[in-house]
Structure formats: C-alpha cells, structure tokens
Image: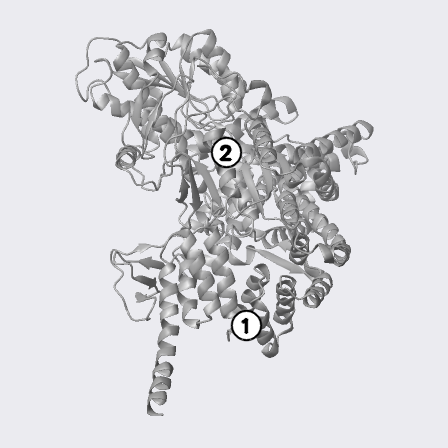
Amino acid sequence: MARLLAILLMLALALPARAQDAFIDALAGLGGGFGAQAEAADRLGTLGDPRAIAPMRALSDGRLLRRADGTLIIRTDGGAIEAATGAPADATGAETVRINNRVRVALRGALGKLQLVSPDAGERLAAAEAVFRSPSAENVPLLDAALARETQPRIRERMELALAASRLVATDAAQKRAGIATLGASSSPEARAILLEARAQNADLLAEIEAAVAAIDRRLAVRRAAETFFQGLSLGSVLLLAALGLAVTFGVMGVINMAHGEFVMLGAYTTFLVQQALRDIPGLAPFALPLSIPAAFLVAGLGGLLMERGLIRHLYGRPLETLLLTFGVGMMIQQAVRLAFGAQNREVTSPPWMQGTLLLPFDIPVTANRLWILLFSLAFFVLIVAAIRFTRFGLEMRAVTQRRPIAAAMGIRTGRVDALTFAFGSGIAGIAGVALSQIDNVSPNLGTGYIIDSFLVVVFGGVGSLAGTLIASFGLGLINKVLEPWAGAVLAKVFVLVAVMVFIQRRPRGLFPQKGRAAEA
Amino acid sequence: MTDVTRISRRAALMGFGATLAAPAIGPAFGQGAPIKVGVLHSLSGTMAISETALRDTVLMMVNWINGRGGLLGRRVEAVVVDPASNWPLFAEKARELLQVHRVDVTFGCWTSVSRKSVLPVFEELNGMLFYPVQYEGEEESRNIFYTGAAPNQQAIPAVEYLMSADGGGARRIALLGTDYVYPRTTNRILRAFLNSKGIADADILEEYTPFGHSDWQGIVARVKRFAGEGKKTAIVSTINGDANVPFYRELGNQGIKAEDIPSVAFSVGEEELAGIDTRPLVGHLAAWNYFMSVQSPANTEFLNLWRAYINNPRRVTNDPMEATYVGFKMWAQAVAAAGTTGVDAVRTAMYGQKVDAPSGFTLEMHRNHHLSKPVMIGEVQADGQFNTVWKTPGPIVAENWSPFIPENANRRRG
C-alpha cells in the first residue's frame, strides 16, 4: 500500500514536470531551421500551453533573439527576457531569429489556437480568423469550447465559419455536411476558397460542395459589381483631382499649360517636406497631411504666379508658343526637383486612418486611402465651384474670360485677374499633388503621368465647363474599370482613348459645350 | 551633359564629395591618352529611379582604378551621356559615344528595349557594351557582355522555390508585368516551364500594365479573386520601374499578406524599396544574384568602396550595381591581360576571366558572353533590406537560349 502511494505521488509530481519539458523541448525548435521552426510552432499550438504565446508572437514580429549558447530571448520595450522562463536576460551579442512564409503560416495557426479564449476581443477575432485559414480536425473541440463562452456576434460569426472549415477536414461525413452547409450560407470569399479546396478529398460530397459554392457566388456577384463601381469612382476621383486645375487654366483661361503636371508634382514634394519638418514634433506629426494642403496650394500657386507674370502673359493669343514654352518650363521644374531631391522616390507615409481596407455596408471592401481621396475630391470640387460662383474674385474671373474689354471698362484690372486665375489653377494642381502622394510615387516624373489624362478629361468634358470635367472624369474612370477585367489594363486604356477620339470627332466641343459669345472668343 | 567637366561639376553639385580623379591629384600616369569609359544610363525619365545608381557605380569604379594607377599606365576617364529613358535616343547616344567620344568600352542600359535599340549600333561600329541587368535571354551579341542573370539564373529557380514546400507549395501563379519585351518573353518561358511541371493554363493568370502604371486596385482585386479558387496561389512580378511602389502599396492596403499570397519580384531591389514603407510587405520575395545583406569579404569591400564614394549612409547597393562592379573589374582584368583596349583583343581575353563577387562566389565569364551566377531568394524585411531565405549551392551557368522557347532552343554556341 505504501509503495503504491509512493508511486502515485511520484507520478503526480512527474506529470507537470513532463508537461514543462514538452514545452521547453518544443520551444527550442523555434530557434532552429525553417522546417524545425514550423514543426515547433505546430507542437506548441497542440500543447496548448499559454506560455508559448509570447515567444511565438515575438518570433513573428522579429523580436525573438538567439544567443550564441542557443538561449532564446524576447526583446521587449525596455529590455529583454528569457523565452522559456520570463526572467530578465542579457541580449548582448544575440542575433535575431529569421523566419520564412512557411513558418509564418504555422505560427499564425498555432497562435490562433492558443488565443481563441484570450480575454482581449481583438485577439479572439484575429485568432478565429487565423484558425479559419488553417483548418484541422483538432481545432473542432477548441472552437466548440471557445464558442460556448463567446458573446460578441462578430467574433461568433468568424468562429462558426472556422468551425465549419475545420469540420470539413474531419472524418465524419455528417460533420462534413454541416460544415459545407455553414460555409455555403456565408458570403465570404475565403469560405468559397476552402470549399473549392475540399473538392479533391471529398468526391462523394461534390454535389453539396458545388451547390454551396454557387450559393456564395450569387451573393458575391453583387459585391463584385459594387467593387468594380467603386474602383471606377476612385479612378475618376484621381482624374478629377488631376484635371481640376487644368480645367481652370486651360478650360477657363485657354492657356495650354504643359507644365500642369509639374505643379501637381510640386504639391506632392511639398507634402514630403511638410511631413519631414513635422516628423519630430509630437503634437503636430499626425496633422502633417491636412497641413500640407494649404502649403501645397501656396507653393504651386506661387510657382504659377511667377510663371504667368514672367512668361505666359507675353504670349496670350499664341497657343503654339505657349505650348512649347510651358513644356520647356515643365522639363526645367522636373530636372530642378531631380537635382534637389534626387531621382529616387521620396517616401510619404500615410496616416493610419488612410491605410488598410474598410468594409462598407454589405461587406463591400474599399481601401481607405482611395475612399478618402474620393470624398476629398468631391468636397474640393464643390469648394472650387462655390469659389468661382459666389466670390468677388470668381465674378471678376468670369467677367474677364467672357468679355475682356467690357470687364476692363468696368474697372476690373484684367492683368491682375489673369495672374490670380493662373495662380489659382496651379494651386489647385498643387493640392491634387497632396492627394496623389498617397497613391502614387513621389518622384520627379509624377506629373508626366497625369498631363495627358488631364487634357483628355477637360477636352472630353467640354472646355470651360467644370461640370463637364466632373462628369467626364467619373465617366472615363468607370468605363476604364469596367473594361479592365475584359481587356486588360493596356487595352482598356486604348479603348478609352479611341472612344474619346470618336466622340470628339462627332462633338468637337465635348460633352458640355460652352454656348454664346464666350465660345467664339 | 556630354563632356567630362560638366559631369564633375554636376557630381559636386549633388554633394558626392568625391569627384572624378583629376590628373593633378593621385598617382602619376604615363604619357598615353586616357582610356575612355562610356556611361549610357538614363538620368531622367521613368527609369532614372533605377539607372542613376548604376551611373554612380561606374564613376566609383573609374575613381577606384585611377586610385590604383589607372590601366596600362594610362588614366581612365568616364564619358557620361543621358539617354533620358527614351529608347531611340539610346541608339543615338551610343553612336555619339562610339564615334564622337571614341570610348573604349561602354557600361549601360537597363530595360531590354534600350539594349535592343543600341545593339545594332555596337555591332556596326564594333564597340563593347557591358549590360548589368537580369533579362529575358534569347540574345548573344559578340559586342555585348551580359553580367546580369539569364532566366535560368533567376526566373525559373524563383518559381521552383514558390512551388516548393518552403515557398508555400504554390499551384496557381499570377504573372504580372509591365508591357514590354522582358516581361513578355520571361512570362512565355515561365508559362512553358509551368506547363512542363503540370500546371494547366487555367491556373496561370497573365496581366500587363503600361510603364508607370499607378492604379492597381482592379488588378490586385482580380489576383485576390484568382487566389480564391481553392489552390495555393503566388504572384510572379516582372513589374519594372516606379510602377512598383503603387503596386506594393495596393497589396498592403488590400491586406494581401505574404503568408497567403506570396509574391516574388525580378526587378525590385534595395533601391526600389527605398521609397516604400516596407512594414506591410514583410515576407514578400525577390529573386536576385546578390543582396546588400550578403555577408562576404568581397561584399564588405564593395560596401566600403561605395560608402566612401557616395558619402551618404542612406544610399543602398543592389544586384545590377554588383553586376556593374563585377563587369568593370573583369573588363579591367581583361584589358590588363590583353595589354590593349582594342575590342577584339579584350573580347578574347574576357573569356574565362574570374572575379570574387560580392555575392560571395567566384564568377566566371563564359564564351556565351554570360556570367555564371548564384541564385538567391530574399525576403523583404521591415528595414527595406532582404534576408536570404534560399540560395543555390554554387554559381549556375547561364542558358541564354532557353529550352522553353522552341524556335531558339538549339541556337546554343559552343
């Protein structure tokens, strides 16, 4: 009896020790080669020891170090701790442990398993997502347990999908059917991919799987159409921004300004400079982008003012010379920027609210930066129309462009209005540069890519008509994006150009021709 | 921007402390006229982002060789021209270098269209061009030495890696490229290669965009959809020039993680990553024959030389710069061996020349005018550098006539 007790006691003491050994044993693998790392992550996920969370997270963030003696160390904000014990450690001479994509996938799956019951809701959602992407039969009991105590509907929904996906790889046919039904009832592209992947192993359930995929496809069709529509609107908003300044200088004043793109580029570089200047000021750094808007307007506007007073005013009524002159000035600005900043791209960072994807109602995914630019372009358009319509300066501008001698006779200083209008148009181009810095390269060539498109939009919309510019840019953007999946990006652009050429043949004055005397002037 | 004095003023303007070695400074040179090295890289236009660094590399090497007493006792002098990313202008500038400046050798070109544009000029005037960039192959001019990779030294090993267990086991491939000869030919080779590995045409997506394309939302969304067909998918990118920045930005914004859809790029190096926030891109791949992060004595020497010359700690090195460096060293060795700069003598002396390259391997110039090169796959890191995750055990001999292009497969020379 006493011997039996002694053996039981020994076993009871040995158990936790062995569990710990398994953890320590698996942990060491995280410092090995890529294959050993992936294996270790899988083992740690299966062991279910929450102590594995910190080292695995550190590994995927590049904060796990290995000392020469093989000890794994986690770099923290203040210092370093030992991965196995959590005791403070000395990280001098330790090297960062590298991983590859195979290890990342294994880490994501393992972390998902361990964090399904995390107290943090964000972690639970990420965990459900991760487990969803790496289905396995051993996830089923974990997900059942997690679902039993989960209260948030959004996380529950993800967990149920993950459970369905994991059931699909289980052996029981009834479980598989339940999984297929749940996945088929969702409208998730990932669920669709998982169903398609399962076809190979489940020849007997093919009919059910196909039906579930078809059901998801029906729900996704609307979303895809909405996605394409948004992409078209987004391209349209970029065209609108690029063309608005030109709609003023070319459309209203009639100056063919080939340096327009360079003012856009100046605006983008201003954004870069403002960001650099405010980078180290803690209170102001998040506002760098909004503050760039007036700065870019001033820089590009000042450039426009100098150009109009110095050169263009001597060439009014001589379009060919103006074209050549502005083309040359554009090249000079480009080369000057290249000398000052170098030919390399400058990095303009996006604020956090302009990164990643947002979900609109009905789960339509839109990228944040493009959504903001779309809203910005519309607001900006309204502002410019209002400025031209309701301010004193707008009134004078319209008067001068419509009937110069009469405007002069009424006491308007036409030369001054010309200069300010050109500066205004150039300043608008500068603001466009702020927005474009968020989606395109900030390089000396930034402007060249937009000059043709801008002229296209203004001519297509009808020279002199701001509403025409609005309709034309969104119209061209939508046509381009609808055609792109069918024809490819290169041909879609060609089709749009041909369509505009044919249209201009039929209606040389564009969508919204100016009527009356102004048109003949 | 054609004569030497202007260039040194320009270099000074840009703050590159070290300028071309003036005759008055440095070691004494013999009586002979200087040896002239032509530099034919775009310093403006869409390719300037990539090519200006190559101009700097050649100038650095000219500086280096003059510091060692020149070549054959003569001073070496660089003649820089700017073909401005304008393909026909490349041919004009090449003619100018050969006929007006009478250069002994030229280092130049990045895109294949520019190389195709200058090739007849170099053949007609019997010049010598060193071309330092990976390309699609299917070419072998006796007037060009190709120091970049042929497809079997970059594209094919990279796709093999994507299909391996470590690379994620991809069974569906999206081929995205800029619309010109290099991506189209490379993708033709890759398609034939993938077919031979049992990947059907339905599992290959091929998409081209114009130079400088900035609106990637539609294409990236299509790739996402393409990837959602139940097979592991990977992207192979032959996107060139500054279209890469908006492409990677869109990948990041649409949440495409390297774990789910890894991408491997053939024209994106350290220099191109310098303008991007690389944190969302960690894990995406590039295939090259050299990375700045390689640990080797030759690379330390190369990096020290570059840092001392450019005097800007933020400037990086990349694969085409390494190929320029290796090419220049080989040319200098061949000239020393031949005892002359005559094109025919140097060409013969070039065959079999060996250089300890910064990639950590000894590279040899073969009679097919191509270098043997090691292949490396690197992962983008948060600091804009690459971490090598796979490499070949040794240098691979170039197959410039790809066996996957049936009409040229038998054109191999002895």
Question: What kind of element bears circle 2?
Answer: helix
Residue A305 is situated, as x and y percent measured from the top left of the image, at: 54, 37
Residue A53 is situated, as x and y percent measured from the top left of the image, at: 43, 67
Along the line of sight, the residue nearer the viewer: B171 or B253: B171
Quadrant of residue A493 within the rendered picture: top right
Picture layout, residue B397 above or below residue A427: above
Chain label for disc 2: B
Residue pointed to by mark 2: B155
- Give the mark count: 2
Q: Which mark is residue A121?
A: 1
Quadrant of residue A29 within the rendered picture: bottom left
Picture layout, residue B300 above or below residue B110: below
Residue B108 is situated, as x and y percent measured from the top left of the image, at: 42, 22
Residue A480 in sight: no
Picture layout, residue B143 above or below residue B221: above
- Which residue type does callout 1 highlight? Ala
- Which residue type does callout 2 highlight? Ala
